[in-house]
Image: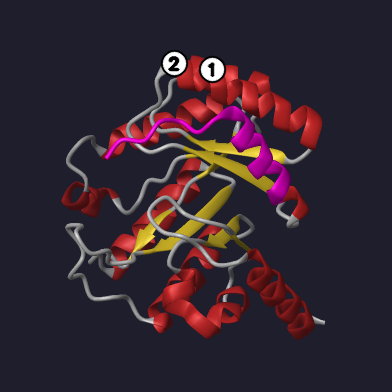
Amino acid sequence: MVYPLIEKRKIIDAAKKAKESGAQKFGIVTSGRRPFKKDLDIIACAVSEIKNKIGIGVCASLGALGKSELKMLKSAGLSRYHHNIETSRRFYKKIVSTHDFNERIKTIKAAKAAALEVCSGGIIGMGENWQDRIEMAKALETLGVDSVPINILIPLKGTPMELQRPISCGDVIRTICIFRIILKDKAVKIAAGRESVLKDFQASAFLSGANGMLIGGYLTTGGRPVEEDQKLIKEIKELWL
């Protein structure tokens, strides 16, 4: 099913709500290979208004854009571009058939050339091995990305991976440790799947190396109430103090 871009006013209202919830950045996300030009223009206008009237950092995940389009968004006020590499180069071709790994790399380099910060990570639990996870972290280190979200596969019914055995909580924690060691001082964030896989052990992700998280809904699944994440942050601070 295809859905249109939501109205600009709804994007701006969502950004205001995110700031009120304590978020540092607000993300604008579209599905598909890339948005139409008319939608990109609307997004640029929304970015400008959010930056000037609401005062929260804006990032976007809009697919395979070129340097000129990314520069236009940068001029509008975008601070960070999100474009996952998803997994290792070796395993990528086993999960994606519409485009290759090099296109992902090209988009990330274009975003950096446009003077944007880059957020790039991937999904674990798709059937990859430990070497694939290590190679993904090394690739992100080489690219010099600023922020790394780690998503955990949720085997949704009706998708090619609906029968994939869920990754264990322990393997998620070990993966975060590996990413922290390889990526040193970069921001490593837990994202989609953290609620269903880590459950009551989400604080362990931060003790093992994560230093951020995505809140709210994700592309294919909803998140949890922001109040629960605020409670988690408070609990983590109490552990560290």
- Is residue 67 shown to the viewer in this render? no
- At 37% from the left and 58% from the top, the residue drawn is 123
10 Å neighbourhood of mark 2: few (<14), some, or many (≥20)? few
Q: Quadrant of residue 171?
A: bottom left
Disc 1, disc 2: CB below 8 Å? yes
Foreground residue among 109 and 216: 216
Q: Quadrant of residue 118?
A: top right
Q: Is residue 171 above or below residue 50?
A: below
Q: Residue 91 bears which disc, if any?
A: none
Q: Secondary structure at mark 1?
A: helix
Q: Residue 167: x and y, percent? A: 32, 76
From the viewer's perspective, is 73 left or right of 82?
right
Q: CA distance from mark 1 to mark 2?
A: 6 Å
Q: Residue 219: x and y, percent? A: 42, 50
- Which residues are the magenta region? 1-18
Residue 202 included in the magenta stretch of the image = no
Q: Secondary structure at mark 2?
A: helix
Instruction: Give, as a three-letter code, the residue at label 2.
Output: Lys
Q: Mark 2 sits on what residue?
A: 37
Residue 10 included in the magenta stretch of the image = yes
Q: Mark 1 sits on what residue?
A: 41
- Is residue 12 shown to the viewer in this render? yes
The quarter in which the N terminus is drawn is top left
Instruction: Give, as a three-letter code, the residue at label 1.
Output: Asp
